[in-house]
Image (cartoon, helix red, strand yellow):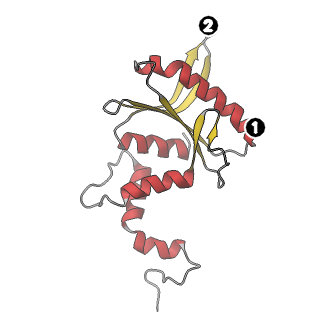
Amino acid sequence: MDYLEQLASEWYEYQGYFVRRDLWVGLESDGNYECELDVVGFHPLKHRLVQIEPLMDCLDWKEREQHLRLKFEAGRKYLHRMFGAAPQLAIEQIALLAATDKPRHGTVAGGKILLLSEFLVQIFAKLATVSVSADLVPEQWPVLRTLQFVAEYRQDVAPILFEGSHARRPGSAG
């Protein structure tokens, strides 16, 4: 599993979703599958179904669109059956991209585009409100736990991240 899949899986599990990773769908007569869905989550109390397709690729937008269209169409075709969800339950489909620039249209292949930077902002916004001494992220989510520590110690970490600013490094002289 790649980093973005791990991060998305941990984040949605942390929020109460039941998450499946690397979910093969569409069993064909020859024993192969139609498609693999990267991260799928269902929140039983909120009745929300989400499919996240992370990409850390160098594909151009046309190739990216084709790749995601296959995955999102398979999600719409199979996920209701797999989760026992009513067909009218909307599937939130998200293309999680490590790209640095967001296209103007905001969607790709029928799914919402979410940049990694935007996703990290969502995560840090929540984790910055949760003290490690009061509510440490459980150890089964090591990436989120690391981000929680970064959020907790942001005043010490920020000067290192922003070396170009006039902030001092922790432990450095004057």
Q: What residue sits 31% from the left and 58% below the top?
A: 130
| Residue 46 position by quadrant | top left
Q: Tag 1's secondary structure? A: helix
Residue 94, placed above or below residue 167:
above
Task: Return the residue nearer the eye: 141 or 129.
Answer: 129
The answer to whether 108 is drawn above or below residue 97 in the figure is above
Q: Residue furthest bottom?
A: 174
The spot of residue 114 in percent (x, y) is 56, 46
Q: Residue at x 45, y 21 (%)?
A: 88
Residue to which mark 1 is pinned: 62
Q: Which residue is mark 2?
A: 29
Furthest-left residue in this view: 134
Seen in the picture, residue 8 relative to 72 is either above or below; the reply is: below
Using the numbered discs, state the Cα–Cα distance from disc 1 to disc 2 in whole angstroms.
30 Å
Mark 2 element type: loop
Mark sitting earlier along the chain (1/2): 2
Which residue is more in the foreground, 4 or 70?
A: 70
Report the amino acid beneath label 1.
Lys
